[in-house]
């Protein structure tokens, strides 16, 4: 490893009481939960840490039904998928095979395979796993425009959290920027919550998300303005309106001024890779996958032999593929730790890859397929 | 405002206990255990802090503890991520101005595995 300083060198002492675990999973979203279930079924001892108040990640705020195959629980609403996964974990918790830390953030990785966990109470403590799966998900991108920092301008995912997870009406009149899947879904969910949606703006000349989601909002009469964007927000202490501009060959042309108390920004996600960077995992910038992502082999293993990755932190995709990646990673960990044979692992991982292939057939997955060509490697040795 | 009716989600039957808390000294009500930011938003409070250099109002943004936009001073402790910190009865919540000062005496607590699965 190339990291130079150990905790002993940095803090001047070694940690007195280092908890040990076989598999540490960072992130309790779809990738982390599925990874945990798979590892537990294969007999491993698992520690799962989640920075938020509850498990489920972005699933808990998804009220729509998922597509794909029944193996990935298609036809089930996202929040119910989270409930099902959490329920399946419960017996393992009772048996002591699984330990879950909520409100706990993994803040540092050291070359001795030590990970520092920080809890809301202020308590920080080290844990030493044999293997780690990083499933830290993604964060929302911001769009540069004047006044984009005004309260009332939120990430579209942030709006979902406020509204679908905690039951807060996020505003009265909303404008959505970005007609990808999240923008379209959030617009529909705002309507369900009784919020007026003025329009969805899309800079491209086509809708980025699935047609079925676009059709749902169009049926409610919400316009989707292609080649339009927000040129500025209006307001002093909080957002009171916005100026909508057309994107022309000569630049932005202001066209409409609207009143709104909520603007949802849905212009894509960036993988949350802070821990991977700290661990000196080899990364590559791949625009198709949302930014810097780790190189990984077919088993989701990174350049650090004890670290695997799964879900959006490996490249922006879908909850369904994240769940499969989590299972692949745990299968690989189980093989490495001697819980299943090479042959069993290969058979299982081949099957999981076949399911990934099926989910990635769609046209909207073409970016992911191209991105994978750049990050999928074979580690020597 | 709290959502009461929803075509898919059932909020009203599942709400936790209503508790009293203080925002800038003013008495408010919110749900215990839900994030502080949620109860503030439902009470119509959207400005959570003022930025360090330009003193601009900042509010909620990512809701998952990643962006730092919702930092507030909670019971004297600054830089609290109010989007992932649960509301407790009697909490005193203030808007944060600038960076805030950390009083190390206020930080305490024991590490523990949660039973919430």
Image: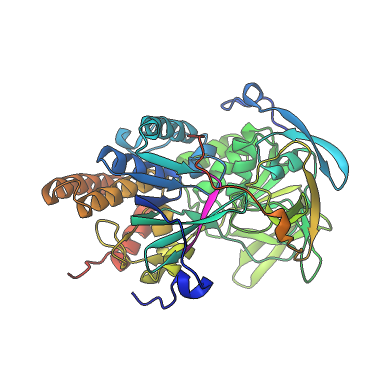
Q: Position of residue A106 (x, y in %)?
A: 49, 56
Q: A361 above or below A275? A: above
Q: Position of residue A241 (x, y in %)?
A: 78, 53
| Identity of the residue drawn at 42% across and 67% down | A110
- Would you say the magenta stretch is mainly helix, strand or loop? strand
| Identity of the residue drawn at 62% across and 32% down | A192
Is residue A107 within the magenta segment? Answer: yes
| View extreme (left): residue | A343
| Identity of the residue drawn at 58% across and 27% down | B9
Is residue A7 within the magenta segment? Answer: no
> Could one spot residue A55 in this view of the protein?
yes
Q: Is residue A340 left or right of residue A144?
A: left
Nearer to us in this view, B32 or A59 = B32
Residue extent of the magenta highlight: A102-108
Nearer to us in this view, A137 or B116 = B116
> Could one spot residue A238 in this view of the protein?
no
Q: Quadrant of the C terminus of chain A?
A: bottom left
């Amino acid at each position: 490893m190339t990291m130079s300083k150990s905790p002993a060198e940095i803090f001047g002492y070694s940690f007195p009481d280092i908890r040990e675990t076989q598999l540490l999973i960072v992130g309790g979203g779809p990738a982390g939960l599925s990874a945990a279930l798979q590892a537990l079924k294969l007999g491993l001892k698992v520690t799962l840490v989640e920075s938020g108040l509850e498990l489920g990640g972005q699933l808990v705020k998804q009220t729509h039904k998922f597509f794909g195959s029944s193996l990935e629980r298609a036809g089930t609403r996202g929040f119910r998928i989270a409930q099902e996964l959490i329920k399946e974990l419960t017996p393992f918790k009772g048996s002591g095979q699984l330990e879950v830390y909520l409100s706990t953030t993994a803040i540092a990785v050291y070359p001795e395979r030590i990970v520092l966990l920080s809890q809301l109470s202020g308590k920080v403590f080290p844990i030493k796993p044999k293997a780690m799966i990083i499933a830290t998900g993604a964060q929302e991108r911001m769009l540069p425009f004047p006044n984009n920092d005004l309260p009332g301008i939120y990430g579209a995912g942030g709006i979902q959290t406020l509204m679908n997870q905690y039951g807060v009406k996020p505003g009265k009149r909303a404008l959505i920027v970005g007609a990808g899947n999240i923008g379209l879904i959030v617009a529909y969910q705002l309507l369900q919550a009784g919020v007026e949606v003025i329009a969805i703006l899309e800079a491209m000349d086509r809708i980025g998300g699935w047609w079925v989601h676009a059709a749902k909002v169009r049926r409610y009469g919400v316009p989707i303005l292609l080649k339009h964007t927000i040129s500025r927000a209006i307001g002093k202490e909080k957002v009171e309106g916005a100026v909508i501009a057309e994107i022309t060959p000569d630049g932005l042309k202001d066209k409409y001024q609207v009143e709104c108390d909520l603007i949802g920004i849905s212009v894509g996600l960036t993988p949350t890779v802070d821990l991977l960077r700290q661990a000196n995992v080899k990364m590559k910038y791949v625009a198709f996958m949302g930014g810097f992502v780790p190189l990984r082999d077919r088993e989701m293993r990174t350049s650090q032999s004890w670290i695997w990755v799964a879900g959006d932190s490996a490249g922006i995709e879908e909850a369904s593929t994240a769940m499969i990646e989590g299972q692949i990673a745990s299968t690989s960990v189980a093989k490495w730790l001697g819980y299943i044979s090479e042959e069993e692992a290969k058979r299982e991982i081949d099957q999981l890859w076949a399911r990934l292939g099926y989910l990635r057939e769609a046209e909207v997955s073409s970016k992911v397929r191209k991105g994978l060509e750049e990050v999928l490697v074979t580690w020597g040795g | 405002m709290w959502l009461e009716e929803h075509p898919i989600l059932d909020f009203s039957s599942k709400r936790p206990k209503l508790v009293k808390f203080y925002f800038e000294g003013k008495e408010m009500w919110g749900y215990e255990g839900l994030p502080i930011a949620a109860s503030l938003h439902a009470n119509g409070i959207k400005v959570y802090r003022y930025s360090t250099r330009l003193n601009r109002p900042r509010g909620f943004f990512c809701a998952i503890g990643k962006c730092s936009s919702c930092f507030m001073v909670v019971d004297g402790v600054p830089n609290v991520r109010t989007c992932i910190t649960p509301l407790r009865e009697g909490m005193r919540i203030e808007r944060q101005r600038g960076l805030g000062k950390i009083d190390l005496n206020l930080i305490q607590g024991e590490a523990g595995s949660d039973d919430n699965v």
